[in-house]
Amino acid sequence: METVPSAVLNKEILGRLDIEALCSLACVNRALRFSVESQALPSLSSLHLSTISPDGQTLIHILGRCKALCSLTLNCLRLQDHSLCAFLTPRIRELNLWCCSSLSYQILASIGHNCPNLRVLMLELADKESPHLFENNLAIMLTSCLQLESLSLKIRGFGVEVDACAFQSIIFFLPSTIKSLKLQPVLERDAFFLIRRIGRNLMETVQPPILTSSYYSSFNLRSLSLVLDVITDELLITITASLPFLVELDLEDRPNTEPLARLDLTSSGLQSLGSCHHLTGLSLTRCRHNHQGTFKRVNDMGMFLLSEGCKGLESVRLGGFSKVSDAGFAAILLSCHSLKKFEVRSASFLSDLAFHDLTGVPCALVEVRLLWCRLITSETVKKLASSRNLEVLDLGGCKSIADTCLRSISCLRKLTALNLTGADITDSGLSILAQGNLPIMNLCLRGCKRVTDKGISHLLCVGGTISQSLTTLDLGYMPGISDDGILTIAAAGIGIIDLCVRSCFYVTDASVEALARKQPDQEKSKQLRRLDLCNCIGLSVDSLRWVKRPSFRGLHWLGIGQTRLASKGNPVITEIHNERPWLTFCLDGCEIGCHDGWQFHESGFI
């Protein structure tokens, strides 16, 4: 490396590496450490730290050397306001802050004061303060960031009603430069006011009698995403009338009770979407967390009208349409010839018949997700396999999926993600899957009760493509998985960096030891980054000794909720936390990365 010119080293080699690779390279020798600290880090324009949760001291150590950052993405699970404010500068153009469990609403005002040139802001906050305080700080931020083009604000808490009034006054301060807007949560009545005001501003800025798309381009909301208390016909009609050049629309509602007939979505509301001629992405979902409700007033006719009016759709996501049958969903598939992404959730009447004619038409599908559709069987998968460009296939909760379709799946040479949660597959099926040339990186077998340790051996030990490409493996809630299966993963799963074995009751300390002893020194072997051991009741407190240095050198996140290890007063956890500040302990039972429960965390690592 000493013979490589410094300009080539910094631009062509170091300049192409991410922060973790740079940190590893700096440990090789003093010369490389000097190059990384004096040249590579100060010249970084973008930094992405969403997979780890640094504390304040670690953040200072990293960002203190990065003087040219324009784009910053952080997991803020363990950060306070003062840790972050020092790095908010006028140079920042894009700021993405995830899992802000300890940040106050004051951070909004700080962003406005320090980042006036901001173009993109994504912020996830916990519902811990008053809506009035949120409104005041939001107003300061919006009146300071006058070049903002994309704004995503999510307040996560116990329900949609908690802080739903926090966005009531946002329209009075929203910059006219906004082209993408995502808000969570919002009351339907406030969404009306917001959309009508934006539409009125649009009309007031247009003078020519003929309105063209190019004329709107300087002031036009192109993408709208809202999480509401209820989706109604009137809301959809207002959106289509006020935002005729909308490209992406994402609406989710979380009603606490069954909506009244006049305050619900019907087929008439779907028909109104036909006036949005530029619409390429549509997502309409009814969440079942608060109330086991669905869109009961939308039937096949609504889907027929939607498919006729929106033939240019490239992405469709539909959740909770319990009265729509195969004919309605097939209309979308057959009419939208540019459709690349298709997702349906909790559709009681969706069956194999919806995909019967799929092989007879040109198919551009790249991503298909059919979640908790109980009538879907292996026959649907065989039809979908005709789309050779398929990269993502999610069949989570489709319990009639069996081994018979796995040979068809094994022929998909571009498939990178496969979810078979709850499927009726066996060890023999995994053997078939392993023999194909699948470049699968993300595989979920959660709840596959007929798969055992032998199936994991078939998957990883036959030398197929999947054994080399697999990086994320979910084996949660599988009674057939024990220490033998984990020993196989430690020995043969050379690329696995995320592993979930939650609620595998036969996993013991021997598994933790095997994973801790995994050697990443061999070619293509990677270190484990995130490990979910939640509710593994076979573990003892003694297994924590394997989490100490030098074991698990690359581990960033460890989930030990509902185990004997999860004691908040355990001095061993505190000791490990002090010697490994990059490691996040989750004792609350969250899924990997705490993406589903960070808002309830009282502190960063416990």
Image: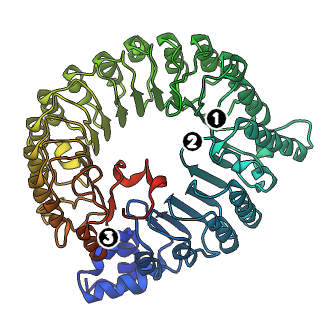
Upstream in sequence: badge 2 or badge 1: 2
- Residue picked out by circle 2: 159
State the SS at label 2.
Answer: loop
Question: Mark 1 or 3, which is nearer the eye?
Answer: 1
State the SS at label 1.
Answer: loop
In front of the other: 20 or 284: 284
In front of the other: 478 or 114: 478
Horizontally, residue 182 falls left or right of residue 398, namely right
- Residue picked out by circle 3: 21
Q: Quadrant of the C terminus?
A: bottom left
| Crowding near the residue tagged with mark 3, few <14, some 14–19, many ≥20 C-alpha atoms within 10 Å | few
Q: Is 248 placed above or below 80 here? A: above
In front of the other: 387 or 329: 329
Q: Position of residue 32 (x, y in %)?
A: 30, 84
In front of the other: 152 or 126: 126
Q: Position of residue 453 (x, y in %)?
A: 10, 38
Give the Cα distance between marks 2 and 1.
9 Å
Q: Is 543 placed above or below 39 here? A: above
Give the Cα distance between marks 2 and 3.
40 Å
Q: Residue at x 77, y 43 (%)?
A: 194
Q: Position of residue 88 (x, y in %)?
A: 59, 74
Horizontally, residue 411 falls left or right of residue 483, namely right
- Residue picked out by circle 1: 229
Kind of residue indicated by mark 2: Gly
Question: Mark 2 or 3, which is nearer the eye?
Answer: 2
Residue 323's tag is none
Kind of residue indicated by mark 1: Asp
Q: Position of residue 132 (x, y in %)?
A: 72, 57
Horizontally, residue 493 falls left or right of residue 123, namely left
